[in-house]
Image (cartoon, grey):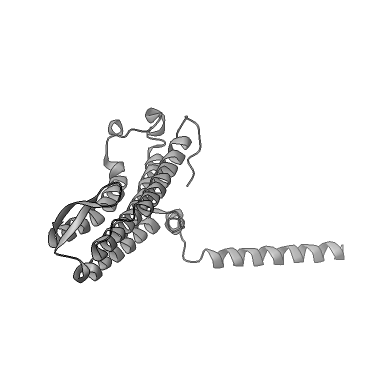
Amino acid sequence: MKLFVDFEEARQTVMLDRDDAINTVFSGIKTLSDLASHEKWKWTSKPVAALLIAGITLFSLALHAWYWNQLPDRVATHFGIDGRPNDWMNKGYATALLCGIQVAMPLFLFGIGSLLQHIPSSMINIPHREYWLHPDRREQTIEHVSKMLAWIAVLTALEMMAIGHLTFLANRTGSPLNAPLFSTILGLYLLGVFSLAGRSFWILRKPGNSISS
């Protein structure tokens, strides 16, 4: 009997210690929505993607400012397959255009993803649309597709920054664009985009699959 009592006391002590540990870990998290807001900050989430887009875009704009005084008055904006320039623009117009594209393209992709919840289901083209956009599954599906677009926006911001840097180097030195490196950057970008989109469409390939983050 004494052994049983000692065991029961030990068990209760362990249970109390476990409850204290759980309360410590989840202190400040009062509701399921609070817990969900914490989950949103894991590294693959949309807020993380938004921060990366903002950081990459600001760095790209800083590159434009740094290269400004090093560029000629007429800037090559288009190059042939051999890397030699075949079209030019005034430096001011070219810089404004490149800055505008650098900001607009990732923002457009991220914005489309964020606005999906307000777009009618009939305008969203995904496999088995009737199943995945059913009211019972629409919110989760929209979140999944929106996250995919957010990370494609991150890749787009990186790709445009890299291409812009190659363009600046070619104009600063007067040498042809580094065509092999340009092709490598473009190829990696397309690989990343198709990988993200392919993963999503594979998950949505048939009704009944589980949408995971």
Q: Nearer the viewer, residue 95 or 73?
A: 73
Count of number-bearing discs = 0
Name the spot of residue 211 as percent of width and height, x first.
47, 40
133 to the left or right of 170: right
Above/below status of 58 relative to 143: below
Looking at the rendered image, the quarter that the N terminus falls into is: bottom right
27 to the left or right of 159: right
Q: Nearer the viewer, residue 54 or 85?
A: 85
Tell me which corner region of the image, top left, top right, bottom left or bottom right, holds residue 172. bottom left
Q: Residue at x 43, y 36 (%)?
A: 201
Name the spot of residue 186 as percent of width and height, x first.
36, 49
Tell me which corner region of the image, top left, top right, bottom left or bottom right, holds residue 196. top left
Q: Residue at x 20, y 56 (%)?
A: 76
Name the spot of residue 148 as percent of width and height, x first.
39, 46
Above/below status of 189 relative to 38: above
Q: Nearer the viewer, residue 139 or 106?
A: 106
